Image: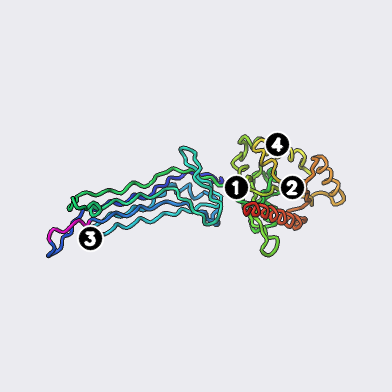
Amino acid sequence: MKFIDEATIEVRAGDGGNGCVSFRREKYIPRGGPDGGDGGDGGSVYLQAVSSINTLIDFRHSRKFIAERGGNGAGRNCTGKSGDDLVVDVPVGTIVNEEETGELIGDLVRDGQRLLVAKGGFHGLGNARYKSSTNRSPRQSKPGTAGEKRRLHLELKLLADVGLLGLPNAGKSTLISAVSSARPKIADYPFTTLHPNLGVVRASAHRSFVMADVPGLIAGAASGAGLGIQFLKHLSRTHLLLHLLDMGPNADPLADAATIITELQQYDDTLAGRDRWLVLNKTDLIPEDEREQRCREVVDALRWNGPVFAISALAHTGTEALVHAVMDFVESRKGLEDGGEDG
């Protein structure tokens, strides 16, 4: 199953209702004046960010969204009913661009945030509006204006605090299933994960963060090879990258690390410079008396001077310490961001 993180949709706001030409006709009231009412405004189209939706896959089947037209005016100064607005739910983190021009319309980053993408047409005017001292019986009215019509390109970037980075079979899916309630598909072959999974990791009461298990990269991913850059973009909003290395007996962690670092640098220098911690996974496959030395050799060979965690996601060893360290880091980073906004 392909993860749909991009979609193109058409939105059309409702047209405004037409104004009415009508004259008052009542018994005992001769020469009644104009009483044609205005039409109703057309409904607008809004996109609304909803945290319960994680993908854009629904837009594979529903691509056109049309708001309700405004009602026409009627006699006796009756105004037409305004068309109902149409609200289309999209995942939090959806970026909305005009398809033809590429113009950025909005970025939906908060649950419940709404974005107007097509304005409803303005109501037409009835002939009662045109009555004047010199024109007592106007037969003039105005039709409603057309609602806006747009073709939109939607792009989703996962809003996760922490992104898991590593080659296929590095153990990312196993780790996210070990520390959260997410249950991604796991198997012993490459590219088990074909779309990102989000898991909420609970460190303690009222302390949690969102972790993204992003599909494994291969050499040439930044140029589109394998699953390509469509998944590298999902790491761009994370506070922290956890770089998982397979420490199993048949793995080559040094070569794997070099591949990932190269792809990050080729894709985005900013992403390559993001905070990144080294997580040596599958240490349970190393004999216990050789484990510490083996991990030290890898760290030294990489000339790594950042945080290092040796874990086994499958055996759940070392994962608790990793979770608490990540939680502290995420809280401190968010605290800095909130302080900057307040200032």
Residue type, label 3: Arg
Q: How many residues crowd around disc 1 within 10 Å: few (fewer than 14), some, or many (20 or more)?
A: many
First in sequence, mark 1 or 4: give its number: 1
Q: Which residue in the protein does label 1 denote?
A: 195
Q: Which residue in the protein does label 3 denote?
A: 76
In terms of secondary structure, where does tag 1 sit?
Answer: loop
First in sequence, mark 3 or 4: give its number: 3
Q: Marks 4 and 1: in contact by CB < 8 Å?
A: no
Q: Marks 4 and 3: in contact by CB < 8 Å?
A: no
Residue lying at 44% horizontally and 47% vertically, measured from the top left: 63
Left or right position of 85 against 202: left
The magenta region covers 30-35
First in sequence, mark 2 or 1: give its number: 1
In terms of secondary structure, where does tag 4 sit?
Answer: helix
Q: Which residue in the protein does label 2 denote?
A: 277
Magenta: main secondary structure: loop
In terms of secondary structure, where does tag 3 sit?
Answer: loop
First in sequence, mark 4 or 2: give its number: 4
Residue lying at 40% horizontally and 55% vertically, measured from the top left: 85
